[in-house]
Amino acid sequence: MALASAATASPWDLEAEAVAVKIRWFGLIVGWLYVHLVSHAEATLPLNAILALGGVYTLLDTWYSYRGRVFLGGYPLAISLLEAIFIGLLCYYDGGLDSVFRFYYLLSLICCAIRHPLRITYLTCGLDCISYSVLYLALPAEQREPFRWLLMLLILAWVTGAAGALSRLIRQAGEQLEELNRALRENQALLEARIEERTRQLQETQAQMLHQEKMAAFGLLAAGIAHEVGNPLASISSLVQMLERRDSDDYTRERLHLLAGQLRRIQGILRELIQFSRPANSERTRFRVHEIVEEALNIAKYYKGTKSRTIRAEVPPELPPLWGKRDQLVQVMFNLILNAIDATQKNGTIVIAAQRDPAGVLLSVQDDGMGIPPEHQPRLFQPYFTTKKTGTGLGLFVTAKIVQEHGGTVEFESQPQRGTIFRIRLPSADSLAS
Ligand code: ADP
């Protein structure tokens, strides 16, 4: 039998129980003082015995309440019955209908109203009325005073109504407060989530702007250098051509020819640099997958370490065309290729592949480099996450943004010391048009 309703005890039950325990102790102490200091009752032994029993019960009640439980919480009517018998006996041994212990009925009712629904309080009132009526009948005929008996019953009914209504008011106010509190907590959580989301958006925008500024500065610098170097280069080139046309010995002609070849190479590099660094075209166009891979590789070939890696591009030209901002997707490929170069040792291999995908095209950049440790993987696309000495941590963040804006997805698989593969899925131009 469960003596305590621990699992079901709500904060309200426990608070109410604590108040009831205090009222009980108050009643017991006043009762004990009354028996020993004021009352002239002869039957002190049974009175003391009943009070001691009440004391044991109150101790148990206190102990349970102290441990956050409600003693006999599931049996409120059993408690009311015990109390009705207890008070009836106290009155009987003390002085009958006039005994001060009859006020215990009121305490019992108030405790009940605080702790239980109105229905239980009314039933308790009924039990108390029966107890008082039995007392009335148990008394010798000359001590029975119908008026006193009736008055007490009326007082009991009145206290029951008043205490019940008061308790219901307090309960309702408590429930409303609880409801307001819950709404407040919900709003607070919502507000915190919004602030978090806005902060994240702000950080991302800031990172994106920083990256764009960096690219723009790089573009300006490259264009400036290309211009400055381009003019003297054009003069040297025409001078070499002039000298080539002159009559000269075989040795000089061969050397001039070599010189002209190297100059053409430098001019080619400058052209590519200017091409890459020109302001990104934000117009959406239709283009082929192999074009963006080739363009990214054209620039990547000047990156340190490219020559000592084997870079293979397996991009069939007949893949479905893509639609979007071409320059941005070149940049995506460029970021992934540079990361793959950084992750591999000398003689490492990087494979850039592309194939049809149900929604469009699947592009992948695979390397056999150092891989990504599992603890870094969740942070890879966050802005500013980098493990490189001179890294910015913006490459993958911007890559993911661009791919998302093109309706695609980026994912990766990596095994430490074995390598990494980044996969990008992009919708074809035709699937976007339909
Ligand atoms: P950055 O290149 O400036 O560090 P990225 O956003 O491009 O910025 O990359 C973030 C980090 O992700 C890198 O510092 C590196 O640790 C890791 N990473 C990216 N690509 C690879 C790869 N292919 N292999 C191993 N680690 C990689």
Image (spheres, rainbow, N blue to C red):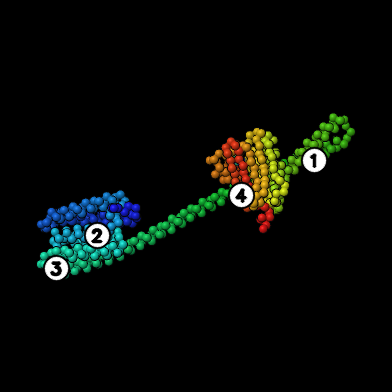
Ligand 1 falls in which quarter?
A: top right
Task: Judge depth for marks 3 and 1 and give the one in front.
Answer: 3
Nearest the eye: 160 or 56: 56
Residue, x 81% and y 38% (percent of image)?
237
Q: Position of residue 421 (x, y in %)?
A: 62, 42
Counting residues from the start of the chain, the first of labels 2 and 4 encountered is: 2
Local packing at callout 2 (Cα closer than 10 Å; few below 14, some 14-19, many 20+) is many
Cα distance between the residues tagged 1 and 2:
110 Å
- According to the picture, the residue beneath numbered tag 3 turns out to be 145
Task: Judge depth for marks 3 and 2 and give the one in front.
Answer: 2
Task: Judge depth for marks 1 and 2 and give the one in front.
Answer: 2
Residue 112 visible in the snapshot? yes
Mark 3 residue element: loop
When asked about the image quadrant of residue 73, the answer is bottom left
Cα distance between the residues tagged 3 and 4:
92 Å
Amino acid at circle 2: Ser
Amino acid at circle 3: Glu
Residue 409: mark in rendering? 4
Amino acid at circle 4: Thr
Task: Judge depth for marks 1 and 4 and give the one in front.
Answer: 4
Cα distance between the residues tagged 1 and 4:
45 Å
- According to the picture, the residue beneath numbered tag 1 turns out to be 234
Counting residues from the start of the chain, the first of labels 3 and 1 encountered is: 3
Q: Is residue 375 above or below residue 279?
A: above
Counting residues from the start of the chain, the first of labels 1 and 4 encountered is: 1
Residue 80: mark in rendering? 2
Local packing at callout 4 (Cα closer than 10 Å; few below 14, some 14-19, many 20+) is some
Q: Position of residue 342 (x, y in %)?
A: 63, 38
